[in-house]
Image (spheres, grey):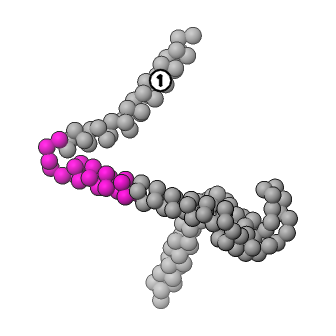
Amino acid sequence: MQTDVTTRKLKKKGSYRKHLVHLFLLPAVLLYGMFQLYPLISAALNSLYSWNGFDRNEFVGLENFITLFTQAPFNTTFWNAFTNNWTYYFVTVLTQLVIAFFLANIIYSKVKGSEFFKTVFFLPKLLSVIVIGFLFSLILNRLGER
């Protein structure tokens, strides 16, 4: 009987700790909401109003989108920009993926020269730490001489 009571207490305490971990996600969720969700929702709401960039004048609903897709200078410009953005996106993403997979294959395979590529990729990270350490040692040594 005593063991049932203690196991229930331990389960309740473990449950509390389990949910306490979610509290650590709160700052990240708040920052995401502040810098991602709020501007997205604000832009969506502003697109439904007639406004000059500073003040919302009146609610026009989907009239701005109808104008964008039907009137002559706006629809050609929109589709041109849309096509350019998607072309740029696909070309850059595909190029980066192909190069990344190729380099990852070289690094993790046992081919001749893979150690050289590992050194070349790791050197910038190592070099920045060395330079910062060297600069701070110079700064702190100069301060100690006075």
The percent coordinates of residue 131 (x first, y second) are 42, 27
Q: Main secondary structure of the magenta part?
A: helix
In terms of depth relative to the viewer, which is nearer, 92 or 128? 92
The secondary structure type at the circle numbered 1 is helix
Quick check: 126 above or below 135?
Answer: below
In terms of depth relative to the viewer, which is nearer, 100 or 32? 100
Q: Is residue 51 left or right of residue 144?
A: right
Query: Which residue is depicted at the point 13% across and 43% down?
Result: 112
Instruction: Give the residue number, with chain letter if any, for mark 1.
Output: 135
The percent coordinates of residue 37 (x first, y second) are 64, 64
Question: Dividing the picture into quarters, in which one does residue 36 lie?
Answer: bottom right
- Can the viewer see residue 123? yes
Quick check: 91 above or below 18?
Answer: above
Quick check: 62 above or below 32?
Answer: below
63 magenta-colored: no
User: Badge 1: how crowded within 10 Å, few (<14), some, or many (20+)?
Assistant: few
Q: Is residue 96 left or right of residue 70?
A: left
